[in-house]
Amino acid sequence: MVSRESFAGWYRHRLVWVAVILLAVSAGAVVLVNRDDPETKPADLQTQIMARMRTTLEQADPGQHNHAGHNAQQAAAAEKPAVICGVRVYGYEPTEVTALADVRTVYGFHLCGVAERGRPWDVAVKLAGPVIMDMSKEPPGIQVVEATAEVMFTDRVKQMFPAKYAELALKEALAESEMADQRRRYDAAAGL
């Protein structure tokens, strides 16, 4: 027969083992989440490239990524309006690199709004379209895709972008989350 004391001792041991098992499973989950997985590096690199593209475009004079003669109206004050950009990375070269410093060329899309004081997004000057960034220079070079009198826009994209990115450039713009973040930052910069 099992006495009450031996049952209580066994039960306490059982709780200790359950706690040990839960602790081991939790530690294993933390290790799996925080491991240095090569598949997480490209996503991290992608985020770094997006941040660098955004910063470069926002710090550049709007004329550097100007489209079809659209210029921001200069305010009477000496203060230059902020340029707020959203970006999408289609790809980069060389494709096998894992560090931002090794990226030479980035192919993507940009949508920038010139945040003049009190001017809502809907009427803001916007600069948008496929863009190629030369990351081997400091600051990175910005080359926008524009049609010419002789070459249509779609043909120009196909001339400037590698085929695997050209199709994306003709179909896809900003992700919804990137657009929402850009609008939030634009409203703050325009004082809205």
Image (spheres, rainbow, N blue to C red):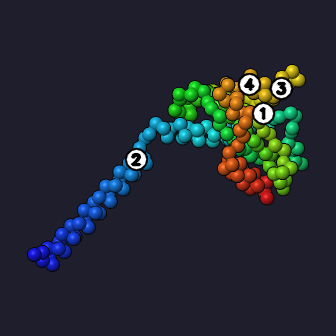
Marks 1 and 4, Cα distance to the nearest angstrom?
22 Å
- Position above or below: 188 against 169: below
Residue 158, disc: 4
Frontmost of labels 1 and 4 is 4
**Residue 133 in sight from this viewpoint:** no
- First along the sequence among labels 1 and 4: 1
Q: Nearer the viewer, residue 6 or 124?
A: 6
Furthest residue toward left: 1
SS at mark 1? Answer: helix
User: Which residue is labeled 1 in the image?
Assistant: 64
Q: How many marks?
A: 4
User: Which residue is labeled 2 in the image?
Assistant: 32
Q: Quadrant of the C terminus?
A: bottom right
SS at mark 3? Answer: loop
User: Which residue is labeled 3 in the image?
Assistant: 152
Quarter location, residue 8 = bottom left
Residue type of the residue flagged with mark 4: Lys
Mark 4 crowd level (few <14, some 14–19, many ≥20, 10 Å Cα): some
- First along the sequence among labels 3 and 4: 3
**Residue 11 in sight from this viewpoint:** yes
**Percent of width and height locating residue 6:** 14, 73
